[in-house]
Image: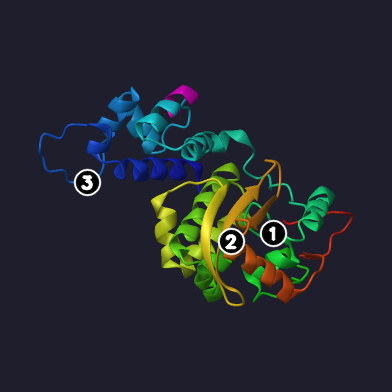
Amino acid sequence: MNGKTQLGDFLQARRSQLRPEDVEVRTYGERRRVPGLRREELALLAGVSASYYTRLEQGNSLSASAEVLDAIAGALRLSESERQYLHELARGDRRRPRARRPAPERLTEATRQLLDMLEAVPAIVLGRRSDVLAWNRLGHALFAGHVAPDAPGQPSDRPNMARLVFLDLHTRELYADWTSKARAVVGNLRLVAAQHPEDAALHALVGELTAKSAEFTAMWADHRVKASGAARYLMRHPLVGPLTVMQQTLDNGVGPHVVVATAEAGSSSRAALTLLAQLTAAGGVGDLPAPAEHGVSVG
């Protein structure tokens, strides 16, 4: 995932997805050999020279200012997440030494206490690569009840939600709109890849999913970007049947984040969550694996 290649691929993909009529560019009825906007049309909308934009898209210039990047983001009609992603790609190689490994992720004592307090709410703790660092009893039952609740000790053996979404039949059937969930997973991985271009384990995960899933390959090539946030999903749970939950990411911006699933008060979905809690019985946090000195390291 070379920074120059990613930047060029992203710009080209988003330019090809933007139709002239979307940005009021006149075509005068001419036949166009390629989809989307031409480079010179995009450059004109962004207020930069066509030659400069071409160099940027070809990966021959990583010195674009924040103002130029914002102008290009505006011309491409990028969302805030996509604009952030563009800035990350443009400065990726200049931000940190390539040989430096990302700091290990840890399940902190504060997060552990939060997970304990969320006993009545399905909750899981995910690392940046979507590795499951921990989950409470209800979170395990809702998201991956078919997976052993306690993972082996090696970080490489931990459940990974991206891998489950694309390669696990149970998880695929769990989401009525699987495509929407899958796109959200890929969109978040795209952001993480820009923020951690030197993460070898993330490279390996993307490589594995690309090799094993044609759907992942197509979505990854689409260059859609989306930060983790809140999204509503209809789930088809094998124990309690259909239920609609709001999946929300609680993120402090500096480490692993907690994902919770809630349902509207008084709804059949809330009743289904209550039933699921009863079926799986009350219990504590399912740690993956047990912490050492209040921290689980993930390389």
Q: Main secondary structure of the magenta part?
A: helix
Going by the picture, which residue comes out furthest to the front? 266
Magenta stretch, residue numbers: 65-69
284 lies left or right of 269:
right
Which tag is nearer the camera, tag 3 or tag 2? 2
160 lies left or right of 148:
left
Q: Position of residue 35 (x, y in %)?
A: 24, 46
Task: State whether residue 143 is above or below residue 297.
Answer: below
- Circle 3: is it few (<14), some (14-19), or many (20+) Cα within 10 Å? few
Q: Position of residue 142 (x, y in %)?
A: 64, 68
Which residue position is annotated with label 1? Answer: 124
Q: Earlier in the sequence, mark 3 or mark 1?
A: 3
Q: Earlier in the sequence, mark 1 or mark 2?
A: 1
Q: Secondary structure at mark 3?
A: loop
Q: Is residue 197 magenta?
A: no
Q: Quadrant of the C terminus?
A: bottom right
- Residue at 51 percent across and 66 percent down: it is 175
Question: Residue type at mark 2?
Answer: Ser
Q: Secondary structure at mark 2?
A: loop
Which residue position is annotated with label 3? Answer: 34
- Residue at 50 percent across and 46 percent down: it is 226
Which residue position is annotated with label 2? Answer: 267
Question: Residue type at mark 3?
Answer: Val
Q: Position of residue 171 (x, y in %)?
A: 55, 70
Q: Earlier in the sequence, mark 3 or mark 2?
A: 3
